[in-house]
Amino acid sequence: MSFQALLTRETENGYQTALEERELTDLGEEGVLVRVHWSSLNYKDALSATGNKGVTRQFPHTPGIDAVGVVEETTDGPFSVGDTVICTGYDLGMNTDGGYSQYIRVPAEWLVPLPEGLAPRDAMVLGTAGLTAALCVESLLDTGLNPDQGPVLVTGATGGVGSITVAILSKLGFSVTAVSGKSESHPWLKSLGASEVISRDSFLENAGKPMLKEQWAGAVDCAGGDMLTTALKSLKYGGCAACCGLAASPKLEMTVLPFILRGVNLLGVDSVELPCEIKQQMWQLLADEWMPVDLPLLEADEVELQGVNAWVDKILQGGVQGRVVVRLP
Ligand SMILES: NC(=O)c1ccc[n+]([C@@H]2O[C@H](COP(=O)([O-])OP(=O)(O)OC[C@H]3O[C@@H](n4cnc5c(N)ncnc54)[C@H](OP(=O)(O)O)[C@@H]3O)[C@@H](O)[C@H]2O)c1
């Protein structure tokens, strides 16, 4: 049986992604066959679609680290034909053909049942970005952080992870300071719940100093590099920063001073390999208490498979505000 999928191929003119017909046998025979209805665009998908070997080693390949759909065939595990499931992370869209496809075939351990009350499309408005945002917030709450301790900083705030983090933190009663490189998006960030928005340039003004004025009770960083070090240097005494991204840089260059003089902490967040039970708990929170107040506000666009390419360069340049949802035919 044939189906439609995006396929990224290595060509003489570089990596090119186009719609192709594939056969179910291309996906192998092991695991659960899922008919995908929705996917989404993440920064990592753009890396895979442009041949980044750190994400995808072998081409041709179908990107898409997120998928939601219905089980069509299963030989073992807890799922039955007809169940609606979410798949994010693990190897999906990296070296296992991903969600920009009418079908995926994955191990049952990669699947989470769609929580009751969460529409499949809404699950992909959130996607890996939402899951990661939830994990960042959870890691800060686990340290005992509460809204009375002061503002929480979010960097890369208009991106997928950043914008959903702003929405969740403000729903939980935190005062959120968003940092963004997009001056035109400041009103949008306020409508998501940010109390204050700072431009990236002014945030980085004193990035070279070893310590900065204590300002934030906590921070969520999606950018890495100077953005993360500046956040760490300006945390209040005992404050924590959750670090999940490298949109600016994978480097971390600073002194140990904020750690040993102010007792600040750096919390690493990974949403890819963590156990499925934890993903399930996070999806439940996202479906209930942590669901952003205005989910449609987070949407940048809805595209079909043919429309994904137009957003790939944009997200690599840090130019997307919110989330792009992908509709499968
Ligand atoms: N650890 C994990 O499990 C995990 C999971 C998901 C994502 N991630 C990582 O988290 C990051 C964000 O992912 P995403 O899907 O939200 O990507 P995204 O939608 O592209 O958001 C990234 C945002 O970072 C900011 N940014 C871009 N370039 C920058 C630069 N040079 N300096 C400072 N800020 C810059 C931009 O926001 P502003 O214009 O508002 O500043 C951009 O919108 C990525 O690095 C991604 O790989 C990690």
Image (tube, rainbow, N blue to C red):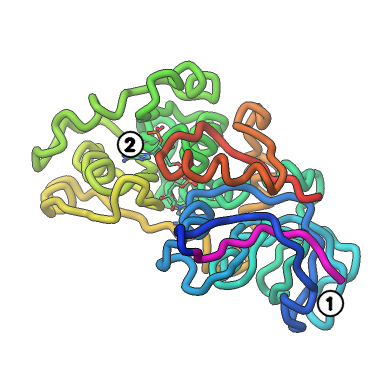
Is 130 located above or below residue 106 in the figure?
Answer: above
Give the residue pinned by disc 2.
217
Label 1 element class = loop
Tell me residue 239's x, y (percent).
Answer: 29, 43
Which residues fall within the magenta stretch?
Answer: 1-11
Seen as rendered, the residue at the extreme front is 12
Seen as rendered, the residue at the extreme right is 82
Label ID, residue 74? 1
Q: Nearer the viewer, residue 281 or 191?
A: 191
> Which residue is drawn at the image coordinates 17% and 28% (left, top)?
205
Q: Nearer the viewer, residue 309 or 281?
A: 309
Amino acid type shown at disc 2 = Ala
Which mark is first along the chain, 2 or 1?
1
Tell me residue 37's x, y (percent).
Answer: 79, 52
Is 49 located above or below residue 76 in the figure?
Answer: above
Is 127 located above or below residue 215 in the figure?
Answer: below
